Image (cartoon, grey):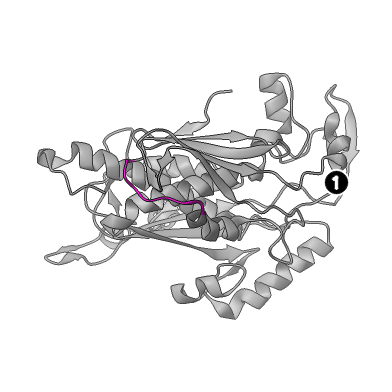
């Protein structure tokens, strides 16, 4: 099975299945001499960890990251960095019904047709459990970005059609939805509860902002920064759309409205979302991802079995009612991985051979 690696200089490969012994990541290209300990992963892993909110799946995982290679005496060596996250609360019994049935909205059908088999226990590689490895890798990426002043913030812009009207980033970590508008948090909570009570699920929109990016990250033509960010974000299973800056709204504007005037001190507006010609322009990078409703729902659904016979499926087991907010740190991590990769490329191959001080 190919397609498990992302990045050029900073390369991340994830491994493991939802109901296997563990998931994890191997990072090649991590600079040597960078302090790194297991405790540095706790905060981000806790933000993604299941079973911490009333509307999460009740699956209980500690999500502690074990560093099993690439660190000596508390510092990275430059060798491949190995990160392991044990699966400690696996229960495959509710999935036995799926041994011969396809779940609508899941990867079961396509995986079976492509590979001739499908891991019915929690989805295997296609499970959201795999994203724990991405968040762990994102912690390392952030350590590369930090000395250059690059910081990322993700938040729930919309959930179940309820949209944040006011953006106050100081409130993002003060509520379970990572929402920047406390006035709508209660409405979001009710919407999720109503969906759960109805045996259904909800989707939403997540926004990620990256501040402090220098001008010059990104490569023409196929390795454009926005193209690589789009690929990274779209590689997360629940994401069905992405926009940069003004995004789809730009299609409704005139050029005179969408262009960002250039002033001596910088850009007057940021419709471009911090990227021009696939290269960062020094402004804040802004991306938004459309997240579909969780396809595992308790309501009856039409499907077929592996022989093509019609069937009716009603799932039981442990499921989230919404991928948000647990997907927020995942999307932050994917953006961090791409930015770290392009930062290292920029330092290695920047204009006039210019290189900054060591990370």
Q: Is residue 218 visible?
A: no
Image position, residue 40 (x, y; %) = 48, 56
Write down the quadrant of residue 213 in the picture. Answer: bottom left
Residue for badge 1: 315
Q: Which residues are magenta?
A: 31-38
Residue 49: x and y in percent read 63, 56
Q: Residue at x 60, y 67 (%)?
A: 177
> Please, what secondary structure does the residue beneath circle 1 have?
loop
Residue 70, image quadrant: top left
Total count of labels: 1
Query: Is 148 left, or right, of 81 in this rendering?
Result: left
222 or 15, nearer to the observer: 15
Taking the spot 41% from the left edge, 41% from the top edge, the residue there is: 72
Q: Is residue 191 left or right of residue 300?
A: left
Q: Is residue 283 above or below residue 98?
A: below
Q: Residue at x 76, y 48 (%)?
A: 89
Magenta-colored segment: predominant secondary structure = loop
Q: Please, is residue 309 above or below residue 323 in the view?
A: above
Side (left or right) of 296 relative to 205: right
């Amino acid at each position: 099975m190919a397609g498990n690696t992302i990045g050029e200089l900073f390369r991340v490969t994830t491994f493991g299945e939802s109901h296997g012994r563990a998931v994890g990541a191997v990072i090649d290209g991590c600079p040597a001499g960078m302090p790194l300990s297991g405790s540095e992963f706790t905060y981000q892993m806790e933000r993604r960890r299941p079973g911490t909110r009333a509307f999460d799946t009740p699956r209980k995982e500690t999500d502690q990251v074990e560093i099993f290679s690439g660190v000596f005496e508390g510092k990275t060596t430059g060798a491949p960095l190995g990160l392991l996250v044990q699966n400690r609360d696996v229960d495959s019994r509710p999935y036995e019904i799926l041994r011969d049935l396809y779940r609508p909205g899941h990867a079961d059908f396509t995986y079976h047709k492509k590979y001739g088999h499908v891991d019915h226990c929690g989805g295997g590689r296609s499970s959201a459990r795999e994203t724990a490895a991405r968040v762990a890798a994102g912690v390392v990426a952030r350590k590369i970005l930090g000395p250059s002043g690059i910081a990322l913030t993700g938040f729930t812009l919309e959930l179940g059609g309820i949209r944040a009207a006011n953006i106050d980033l100081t409130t993002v970590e003060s509520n379970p939805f990572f929402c920047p508008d406390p006035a709508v948090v209660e409405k979001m909570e009710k919407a999720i509860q109503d969906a759960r009570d109805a045996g259904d699920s909800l989707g939403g929109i997540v926004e990620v902002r990256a501040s402090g990016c220098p001008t010059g990250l990104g490569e023409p033509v196929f390795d454009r920064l926005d193209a690589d960010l789009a690929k990274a974000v779209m590689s997360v299973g629940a994401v069905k759309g992405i926009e940069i800056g003004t995004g789809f709204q730009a299609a409704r504007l005139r050029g005179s409205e969408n262009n960002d005037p250039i002033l001596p001190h910088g850009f007057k507006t940021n419709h471009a979302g911090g990227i021009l010609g696939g290269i960062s322009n020094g402004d804040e990078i802004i991306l938004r991802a459309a997240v579909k409703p969780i396809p595992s729902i308790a309501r009856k659904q039409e499907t077929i079995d592996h022989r093509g016979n019609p069937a009716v499926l009603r799932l039981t087991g442990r499921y989230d009612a919404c991928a948000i907010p647990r997907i927020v740190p995942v999307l932050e991590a994917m953006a961090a991985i791409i930015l770290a990769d392009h930062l290292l490329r920029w330092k290695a191959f920047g204009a006039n051979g210019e290189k900054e001080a060591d990370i």
